[in-house]
Image: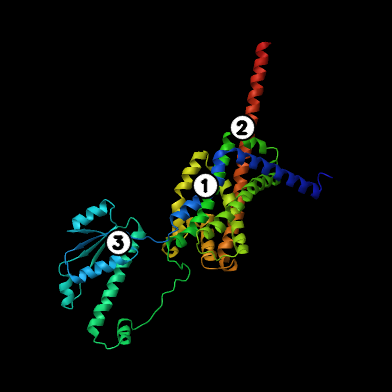
Amino acid sequence: MKKNSLLYKINEGIHDMCYIWAKEIKSVVQDEGVLIFFIIVPFLYPLIYSWAYNNEVVREVPTAVVDNSNTSQSRTFIRHFDASPNTKVAYRCNDLQEARDLVEKQIVHGILYFPEDFATRLNRMEQATVSVYCDMALMLNYKAIFQTATAVQGEMNKDIQISLSGNYTDREEQISTQPLAFEEVPLFNSTGGYGNFIIPGVLILILQQTLLLGIGLAAGTARENNRYKDLVPISKHYNGLFRIVFGKALCYFMIYMVISAYVILVIPRLFHYTALARGTDLVGLMVPFLLSCIFFGMFVSCIIRYRENVILLVVFTSIPLLFMSGASWPQSNIPGVWQGISWLFPSTWAVRGFIRMNSMGATLHEIQFEYQMLWLQVIVYFLAACLVYRYQIIHTRKRAIEKLNYMQERAQKAKSNKQ
């Protein structure tokens, strides 16, 4: 086979890629830190996170009651409030200060306050007030207390309205309390729970963060052990550089295709979350997402010098990336500057695409914009990874040459001293 023939170059390229792939697989298996972030963390973290939110809603949230009215109307309100599955009247306090002390100690998460004139104002046909104080440390507790109090006051308002209407039939009472009939139907989050709302975005973010951590640790270990010198013979030209990047990316891609299948297919079905996406559409989305994450991780890993810094940076950006993706905060309310910053990360487009596919039943064609942006990131970050790897290899070659020259000079000086 001629060296300049196309077939020879293809065979040489495949051989070099397989060599780099085998070296990277070996380094991943031998590095305990990389194995933890590539295998153990993506296996356990989705389980723990999904299990924590598997109940979807909170139940029996403890609440304190301050009933200065002490009338049948206030006791009816409290009884209905306590009968709800979401809340529980845990303490009855004499004043607001006593109830506030319970909230500060986290014994209760909210307060119901009935003023002295509560029943008097109702009997005078005046508007009465029930004050609801909620601990905003956890939005789920706030939601349970506030919505339950709102539902109870709505039912009591209906009873008062019926008693004053003077109707003769049940149908007349129904029309007077609800002149406009409506039916509330959740379109996508059928359970109305927090798990179905947030878990899909978190799963995609887990894939990105663990992949970046693993690649960063692997690159840091290679830099500390000076393993880049093994790549110097292959990187004599640009084709060799492409082989290095493709060979290393192939290693990470093969590992994370298996991990991503477990995370996005097994976890939602294991915890009975909404899963409407078709398998072919998921594969079409995950391929550019994983490739863009891999090339982005290779690019970042060459910029950050120490492997410990990779952990700090990736962990620090986890929560901001979740917010900027639009999964837990409305995308329309995110400032333009932060939206522009979010476009740099593959998770932004993958989270939006995955939620629409998995929770809303969208097809790959219907998330075409996110799909195209992921492929654009694949191209951009591949070229960026090639540039930083080229710099890294050239730097390693220079250091090797300098070290060789230094050793030769020392050998010559030692030889001259003997003579």
Pick the residue in front: 94 or 295: 94
The picture places residue 209, in percent across and down from the top left corner, at 51, 49
Position of residue 320 measured from the top left corner of the image (x, y, whole percent): 44, 53
Determine contact: label 1, label 2, CB under 8 Å: no
Question: Where, quadrant-wise, is the N terminus in this rendering?
Answer: top right
Q: For numbered disc 3, what is the local secondary structure?
A: strand
Residue 50 in percent (x, y) is at 47, 55
Who comes first in sequence, dot 1 or dot 3? 1
Mark 3 lies on residue: 88
Instruction: Name the residue type under label 1.
Output: Val
Real-space Cα separation, disc 1 to disc 2, in angstroms: 36 Å
Q: Residue furthest top?
A: 419
Q: Which residue does the numbered mark 2 point to in the structure image?
A: 399
The tag earlier along the polypeptide, 3 or 2, is 3
Relative side of 399 to 184, left or right: right
Judged by depth in the image, the label closer to the viewer, 1 or 2, is 1
Q: Residues within 10 Å of mark 1 (few under 14, many from 20)?
A: some
The relative height of residue 229 versus residue 252 in the rendered view (above or below) is above
> Considering the image in quadrants, where does the C terminus appear?
top right
Q: Residues within 10 Å of mark 2 (few under 14, many from 20)?
A: few
Q: Name the residue: 67% across, 23% down.
A: 408
> Which of the labelled discs sits on residue 41, or is there none?
1
